[in-house]
Amino acid sequence: MSDAANRPPHFKQPLLTTPFHSRTRACSTVDQFVAWAGYTTVDVYTTVEQEYFAIRNACSVYDLTPMVKYRITGKDAENYLNRLVTRDVRRVKPGRVAYSVWCNDDGHLIDDGTIFRLETGEFLLCTAARQLDWLLDSAIGFDVAVEEVTESIAALSLQGPTSCAVLKALGLRGVERLRPFDIGRFVLGGADMTVSRTGFTGDLGYELWMTPADAVSVWDRLMIAGASSGIRPIGSQALDMARIEAGFIMPNIDFVPAEASVRIGRGRSPFELGLEWLVDLKKGHFNGRRALVAEQKRGAARRLVGLDIDGNKPALKALLYADKSCRREIGAISSALWSPTCKRNIALGLVDAPYFETGRQVWAEIYLCRELEWERRVARGVVVEKPFYAPARRKVTPAWDR
């Protein structure tokens, strides 16, 4: 546990700092930070554009330490997780990672996250927000221990086409043989480090997991090893651009977690969020199964889809309509940007049936503020397949060096 985590919060600085803070603070030139899960993290280091292109053209480093982590152990650990989440955890072998979601009894998403199967009866569940109450309530009747270990694990996300080359230069022999969602264990300068081929950019990338005591040393070694490969620390804004291109969803942006929503009808099911591939209705009972079986029979009333919007003005928070007259509202856009790599105006939006079918035409009502003057635009959009950006290198094994 870091010294910062041991100190009680002060009213002038209530947020914790990560073990990498001395390095991330020194790299920040615009002093732009945001709160994440009780920690202060960098939103932008220099410019969003420079950081974004590091993800797509070179190598980027993101401080992942605030990601909330739970160690789940015990003889019933597998059965517990299989009861909790919608996918079949029994198919996840030791040394592998699986993306998953969990729901309440209404079949509405509480949160999403990654499940690391470290050993036969040991798992690490990582999620963006704290879920300990729900996890402990769900553990009743199971011989399982659930412990939050966020402060005892430091983590970095290393993403981009040269990320494997940087790790090889760092001395991690054999790292190129990790398949997507594999877990590898390495020793760096006498310190143990776990590396998973995972990430939130839809590109070639890895996540590095270590003790807080080794964090600064790993950061420094990484920067030296990646100097010739264009390595650059990135903040949350650049990462958000990459995850939209990859078609990944974010809680409180693309959906409201079920236990946080206060209005009836605001919860979203995996089917509505385009995550039906994560739902295994044949594995046996799990939280929300009855509701999801009923929804599958009647069909989803709405769906989060990818949209290609005319023009180059991002349609963030735009309302969607069935025709250009904007008389019949059929949905809204939750995430949007002009993609520098795809050269497309892309968006993620929740659209009512039957307009969410691929190829359907919709209309977006976009409002632009220019020098304190608002302009209204109505732009045509088409429902398209996700992801918007999916380079071959993200799946190739052995991983490429470029």
Image (cartoon, helix red, strand yellow):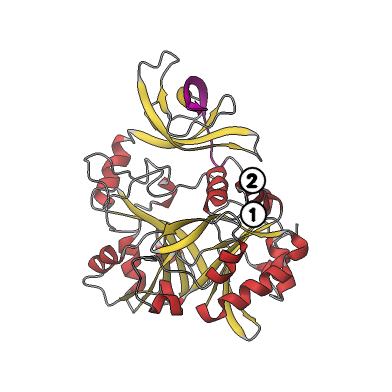
Percent across and percent down for residue 146 are 32, 74
Percent across and percent down for residue 269 are 33, 45
Neighbour tally class for label 1: few under 14, some 14-19, many 20 plus, Cα within 10 Å:
many
Label 2: element kind: helix
Q: Which residues are magenta?
A: 368-387
Q: Amino acid at mark 1?
A: Arg
Q: Which mark is residue 310?
A: none
Residue 14 lies in quadrant? bottom left
284 vs 355: above or below: below
Q: Which residue is mark 1?
A: 394
User: In the image as oriented, which residue stretches furthest toward the right?
Assistant: 228
Main SS, magenta residues: strand
Residue 160 lies in quadrant? bottom right
Task: Determine the residue positioned at 33% across, 66% down.
Answer: 11
| Residue 385 is one of the magenta-drawn residues | yes
In the image: residue 247, left or right of residue 68: right
Q: Quadrant of the C terminus?
A: bottom right
**Which is in the foreground here, disc 1 or disc 2?**
2
In the image: residue 269, left or right of residue 26: left
CA distance separating discs 1 and 2: 22 Å
Percent across and percent down for residue 158 are 61, 62
Q: Is residue 119 visible?
A: no
Neighbour tally class for label 2: few under 14, some 14-19, many 20 plus, Cα within 10 Å:
few
Chain-order first, disc 1 or disc 2: 2
| Residue 69 is one of the magenta-drawn residues | no
Q: Quadrant of the N terminus?
A: bottom left
In the image: residue 159, left or right of residue 88: right
Judge by depth and name the residue closer to the eye, 27 or 78: 27
Task: Determine the residue positioned at 66% across, 73% down.
Answer: 220
Judge by depth and name the residue closer to the eye, 101 or 76: 101
Q: Which residue is mark 2?
A: 49
